[in-house]
Amino acid sequence: MKRREFIAALGAACAVPAFGQGKGGKAIAVQLYSIGTYIHKNGLDKALAEVAKIGYKAVEFNTCFGKSAAELKRALAANGLTVCGAHVHKRDFGPDRIKAACEYHLGFGNNLLICAGAGNFPRKGEDVDEFMKRHVDYYNVASETAAKYGCKIGLHNHTPEFDITMKDGTTYFDYFFSHTRKEVCMEQDVGWTACTGRDPCEQWRKYPHRSITMHAKEDNGRRKRMDTFDGILGHPPVNAKGVDWPKVSAAADADGVKWWIAECEVSLDSLVPITESFKFLQRLGRC
């Protein structure tokens, strides 16, 4: 589909009934991965200005774009944005790196460091049980250390956390959040959770009050290829059940989730997906 056809189709698709007003008043952010190519082409300053213009109040970084903490702080302030978190590599939680990581992030107002996959999984052929024991110990120590510097750490899920199992059948996700300190945050990606067949709401019930942030994303049905609307909130692909957003909204509020972070994984060079996702969240009563 050509870009002009894509945008025209989106305009028609958004003429859907509005949801009843929810509690609202919750903070809406965007994961900057969603417009990674746009940022590369146009620069971070222009991208942040556009994000603020759409109506987002905060951003979550997936990379810091080679900027100093002072540069990021100025760019955020210039556009009236705050930062609600950042994705980092697991190695940044190591004893030789965590102090520097915390100090850098605090320098631009971020105190939440989340690992989203990088370094989180056992290598092929590695004993899963032994890996998981070391893994949770690593996070527990890092969490205590980060707290000394005024930061929190956490884990963001994809599908492997539900697919990888230990010898007794316990999933990676359940073992991790059953054996890490409650201070280790759970950043649930409800789209990835849903496409494994699990109920995102159940994860908050099992591991309550550990989620400062969540990723608002559609269930993509585990497809290898994403079509036009995939990754835009309110437009699940035809072969996917989709996310029950009113139910998720109620459960997230009950758990105390502060930030809903919209993430779109298609058309990373366009502002259209994050714009239409924001409009969907407005109809949901989230902003």
Image (cartoon, rainbow, N blue to C red):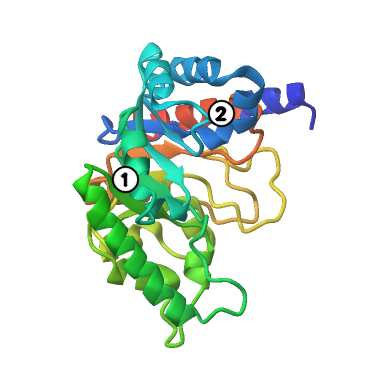
| Labelled disc at residue 156 | none
Name the residue type under label 2: Cys
Which residue is at 54% across, 52% downward?
219
Residue most toward the right? 2
Give the CA separation, mark 1 to mark 2: 46 Å
Q: Which residue lies at the image location 38% right of the left edge and 35% below the top edge? A: 284
- Measured from the top left, where is residue 114 in percent x and y? 39, 48
Q: Which residue, given by chain and number where applicable, does mark 1 sit on?
A: 99
Quadrant of the rendered image containing residue 215? top left
Residue neighbourhood size for the residue with mark 1, other residues' Cα within 10 Å, grouped as few (<14), some (14–19), many (≥20) = some
Q: Which residue is mark 2?
A: 14
Reply above or below: 47 against 212: above
| Quadrant location of the C terminus in the rendered image | top left
Q: Position of residue 45 (x, y in %)?
A: 51, 16
Q: Position of residue 60 (x, y in %)?
A: 42, 35
Q: Is 18 left or right of 228, judged from the image as shown?
A: left
